Image (spheres, grey):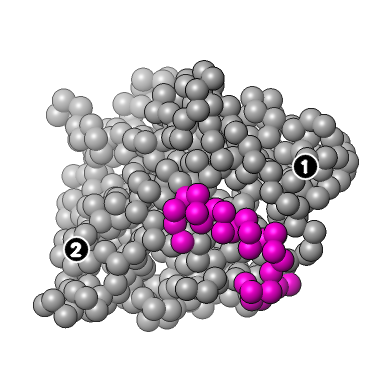
Amino acid sequence: MEKTIARAKSTVLIGLQYGDEGKARVMDTMLKDYQIVARFNGGANAGHTLQVGSINIALHQVPSGIFYKDMMLYIGSGCVVNPKKLLDEIKEIKSNKVKVDNRLFISGYVTLIQPHHLLFDEIYGKEIGSTKNGIGPAYADRAMRAKRSEIKNIRFGDYVYNHKKFKSIVRDNLAHMEEKHGLSEVDIDKQVDEFDKCVMQIKKYLCNDPLMIESLVEKGKSIFFEGAQSVMLDVVTGATPYVTSSRTIAAAAYTGGDLSNKYHYKTLGVAKAIMSRVGNGPFISEFGGGKSELYCAEGGGLDHVKEKEYGDAKPEELLASKDLFDIGKGLRMLTGEYGATTKRPRRIGILDLVMLRQNCKLNGVDELYINKFDCLAEFNKTRLPGIPIVVGYKLNGRKINYMPVSVDEARKVKPIIKYFPHIKEDISMFKEYGNLPAEVKGLVEFIEKFVETKVCGIGVGPEREQFILLPA
């Protein structure tokens, strides 16, 4: 038994900022050494695009190992599942001649996102930046369990075992929501029938054995846990209410991924050199502060926001401005920081090492990967004396080395910024770390020392090959 445990690997990958750090590209370099890839939190509210050759697939609920034909794909109990969206996703995957049957397994413990969850999110989710996928209401019902004698949380395994009983409950939940809000236009029967049909279509992926993953890893199969969202959006430790609805920290991989933590091998953390955030909430290093937060919130959901910004001014002109809001706007345009689906502008911020250090420590990060390092060269076009990096905080005139728990306090924090020499070369064509300019290596070494975590790779461009692994 001991030899098998030592042989099997359980690795956890998490984002260390506010999302969109480029976790997929890091995972892409690692997956070949694993036999199982698993999701342990979230639902259709997060995702990423995989590209292999001419095939381009956006994944939201299916784990990312689809292009490894023998890899098992597992959706763990910590997740919530939208049956219709999952079927649509599987259909798209199959249309690209990629098979998931006999590879995809869904824990019977996952909570199903019911029609009333989507309706509730549509009504109430806007103010906190919800994706309107019903994620929060589904997790809320998981915690509530039932209201009086009415079951609110419906698990996949329960529904499949007695779908007539639970279909009736789904109908009651939607009818109560319609009645409460006077929404007479809702076609209850149609929505419930479609929900039932979709659940029964994904029945073949049901995993009713709580020990399946444990047994496979015990026999030597290695598992890679991919985290959805990022640690700054954790439902407990994030800036409530501007967070997601699940635990996003590394330890959640084991409670939500259905595996004993005795198999843990290492934790990988991903950040990016120019930070971004979608939605409202504290963002200490944000270019333009509250002005940027308001601007990006108002632009949410509009199509062609990037083109609209280009119509206002050229990015190079914005970067040359004395206004930090303009600099953030220019960086957003040049680095493509817009929502992939909504075109929503992402708020832009300086790389914050205080946050990064805290998150590396609290999550036991063994290897740190930093994407968009090449984008730091854009600071050459600004009037700033160098590349800005946040190395400390001040709260009410006192220096602190942590992010405050209170959201109101976090909004009062002022960043302490250190400037590093400009990167004057285009580093996007470099392949080896040893050949990089001294300014790049010096900054990497400073980051590594400050956050007390080994930097193992940096992204120097968007393409698959534009990723440099550092020497051990």
**Residue 339 vertical position relative to residue 295 in the rendered view, above or below:** below
**Residue 311 vertical position relative to residue 144 in the rendered view, above or below:** below
Q: Left or right of 143: which side holds 450?
A: right
Q: Residue 24, percent across and down?
A: 51, 63
Q: Left or right of 355: which side holds 466?
A: right
Q: Residue 77, percent across and down?
A: 26, 53
Q: Amino acid at mark 2?
A: Lys
Magenta stretch? 429-454
First-in-chain label (1 vs 2): 2
Label 2 neighbourhood size at 10 Å, few (<14), some (14-19), many (20+)? few
Q: Left or right of 449: which side holds 202?
A: left
Q: Tell me which corner region of the image, top left, top right, bottom left or bottom right, holds residue 12.
A: bottom left
Give the residue number, with chain letter if any, for mark 2. 262
The quarter in which the N terminus is drawn is bottom left
Give the residue number, with chain letter if any, for mark 1. 385
Q: Tell me which corner region of the image, top left, top right, bottom left or bottom right, holds residue 235.
A: top left
